[in-house]
Amino acid sequence: MKNLEHIGIAVGDLKEAERIFGDVLGEEPYKREEVASEGVLTSFFNAGDTKIELLVPTSEQSAIARHLEKHGPGLHHVAFLVDDLDAELERLTALGYRVVTAPKAGADGKRIAFLHPNDTAKVLVELCE
């Protein structure tokens, strides 16, 4: 693991969430990106060496839509940057951690995978390469 890459926050109203985090962080988001394969629109803020990623569903079938329906808005995941995603997944699965989302393309041009939150203190952990 290299460092904390970003914190993902599920939101129902992207414009309002951008206003709030703009106020809190004292700056505007530096980009929006649609990840059609995930059914989400993301908005990124810089927060020092870490980013805040706001996620709003663009599809009722997306994981973010299901998360909002079940849990409401709030923390969705914590993401860590890794040099070699496959090696990290191999290391972690050997330790008994389950992968819920196999490596695939994600936002920001990164390759991503998620670990099962029941194995990670009820926090969805994303690994980014």
Image: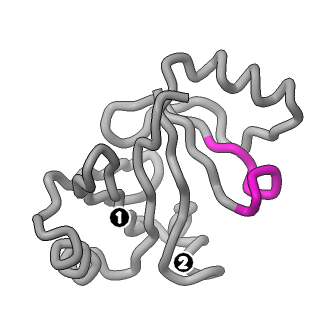
Q: Nearer the viewer, residue 60 or 119?
A: 119
Cα–Cα gap, marks 1 and 2? 13 Å
Lateral position of residue 119 relative to residue 106, left or right: right
Q: Amino acid at mark 1?
A: Leu
- Mark closer to the chain start, 1 or 2: 1
Q: Which mark is residue 54?
A: 1
Q: Quadrant of the N terminus?
A: top right
Please give left or right for residue 116 compared with residue 34 in the image: right
Q: What residue is pinned by disc 2?
A: 68
> In the image as oriented, which residue stretches furthest toward the front?
48
In the image, what residue type sits under mark 2? Answer: Leu
Vertical placement of residue 68 versus 124, above or below:
below
Q: Position of residue 97 (x, y in %)?
A: 82, 38
The spot of residue 106 in percent (x, y) is 43, 39
Magenta includes 126? no
Q: Please, what secondary structure does the residue beneath circle 1 have?
A: strand
* Of residues 3 and 13, the one drawn nearer to the viewer in this rendering: 3
Residue range corresponding to the magenta coloring = 114-122
Q: Closer to us: mark 1 or mark 2?
A: 1
Q: Is residue 120 magenta?
A: yes
Q: Residue at x 75, y 52 (%)?
A: 120
